[in-house]
Amino acid sequence: MAHKKFLLAGALALAAAGAHAQAAGTWFGGIGVTHIAPDVNSGNLSAPSAPGTQIDVSSDTQPTLFVGRMITDHISVEVPIGAGFRQSIRGAGAIAGVGEIATVRVLPITVFAQYRFLEPTSRWRPYVMLGLTYAYSYGERGSAALNGVNPANPPGGDTLLDVDSRFGFAPGLGVTFNINERWFVDAQYAKTFLKTKATLSTGQTIEAKVNPNVYRLAVGMRF
Amino acid sequence: MQQGRRPLLAVLVAAAALLAACGGGGDPIGPKTAISRVVVAGDSLADSGTFGARFTVQNSADPANPFPVFSEIVARNFDVTECPFFVATSATNVVNNPTAGCTNFAVGGGRIRLHDTDATPDLQQTSVPFQLATAGQAIGTYAATDLVLVDGGGNDAADLVTAFLGAGTGAAGLQNYQRFLSQQLDAATLQATLAPGTPAALAAAAGLYMQKLADTYYDAIKVNALDRGATHVAVLNVPDVTLIPALQPALAAVSNANGGGTAGATAAATFKATVQQWLQAFNTELAARVGSDSRVAIVPFFADITEEIGNPASFALTNVTGTACSALGANVNAGAACTSAALDAAPPAGLAAGWWRTWAFADPLHPTPFGHQLLAASVNRALARAGWL
């Protein structure tokens, strides 16, 4: 039954589509799954700390939406929309193995300029893109392990932390598979060059290149 | 199609707003293991007030809240407050604390050795095995929410160095050294080891002593904690006592006995390396006895204090050789003498009030409050790695 409905919807979409190729002036949007996998290059926590006290950042996967518009037949602008990612900051270097020392929520606000190859009517359209990302960090939470391993932690108290929100460039590439005039499937990869700094309430700071690899698989429609 | 686009955009924006509302910060993330009681055995480093004052600088600004020792800092991170099980009625008499529920059994002067052989026997409460046995009896069966924290061996190692150096001073010193060693080594082992009568033989016996001492330490922990159900036992290994101010006179004496200068420095360095071998004999044996037992986390005190003293700037230490309370002509054993206000009022030349806060040592044997924070961080790193914090 559901299968038949899907076919019917598809047929209707096709019938209604007509001129809705990936051409100038077309709007598009959709929903996908985004996996963000930081490739961390950590600096050292400033004194007081054991030499080489570093961090690693875990990956996260979240559903995301996106919306975009074809400016010309080849150039488009796309904006991913998501609720942000919850990332676990873990000890590395001199504090490797201590586990989660903090969590932070990161809302990357990105605008991609994309160049799409081939013709608007092509079934496959690979593209390259360059994005500007503002990684908005909020909701930082330290852990008991952070309090414990931080020699400057006030005894019995907590170490709070603040992660800077920063801009970064995000070059990437992707490919769109046009199922029909209206529906498409899209696979995308971007590398975000993002350096940030965390400041502890006890005064120490640590800088890290987070440089996440961002993978997205999505379905979308034109309208 | 213009009309069709707006509902979709509206849905996207609404969905994003809804998802974003799920974010936000909150309270700190708690420990991986809920610990509701911390049971401590050990020496002055872990003593939370058997004699009243902690063995560190006293807090003039808030005497009711003394600067905590490392065991208290570790406990507070689990929201546990410590109090001493033993309390002194005088310098030579210690009784059980009438206040129930106190589980810090550590006593200043704590040693692993079971007996002492000099004219004035130590308080039995200073025996770490006695503390562990008392704790075991008081607690009965340990719970999964108990953390047992044990330190020891530092005073034993310092005693050994003194006895060893005394052995070179004549027959009485040698006899005393043999008597000292007999606290841990059986007669046959002692006789066989010392038979060559050379300095190397005397040193080898010291290594065996420390190895056996580690067995005594571990056995006391096993019988009184592990065999009573403890599943979270953090054990400090023995620190490199050659780095602490208390051992520097001994090293200087070795240098002087060898004529000072380059020859003296070489002799002192050789002796230092020998003592470090004894300490490593202890730590190697302790690690071997613990093996892969996940109930026990060894805190690498030796490595960590070596790192701290070797990299003072990284730890924000400005002095790792001096003793802050010496500015007052005091040590911390006197309790009230070395206060933060007195130290602030008597800065060494060129330093300002608060100077002592970045020094490692309060007196020849004991850390400053910040030194205790560094030691607590070292313990906590081991706890976190064990998955308990």
Image (cartoon, coloured by chain):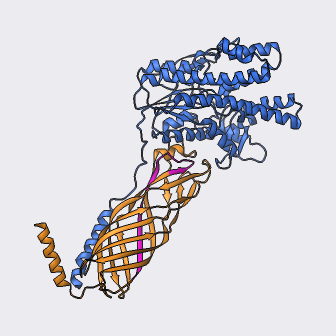
Chain colours: A orange, B blue
B38 versus A150 height, above or below: above
Q: Main secondary structure of the magenta part?
A: strand
Q: Looking at this view, is B300 or B354 the one in front?
A: B300
B339 versus A196 height, above or below: above
- In percent of the image, x 55 and y 38: which residue is there? B379
Magenta segment: A91-116
Q: Looking at this view, is B328 or A183 the one in front?
A: A183
Q: Looking at this view, is B354 or B137 the one in front?
A: B137
Q: Residue furthest left?
A: A1
Expressed as whole percent of the image width and height from the top left, the position of residue B202 reads 75, 21
Q: Is residue A96 magenta?
A: yes
Expressed as whole percent of the image width and height from the top left, the position of residue B310 reads 69, 44
B169 versus A49 height, above or below: above
Is any atom of residue A202 visible in this view?
yes
**Which quadrant would the N terminus of chain B be assigned to in this image?**
bottom left
Q: Is residue B359 magenta?
A: no
Expressed as whole percent of the image width and height from the top left, the position of residue A49 reads 60, 48
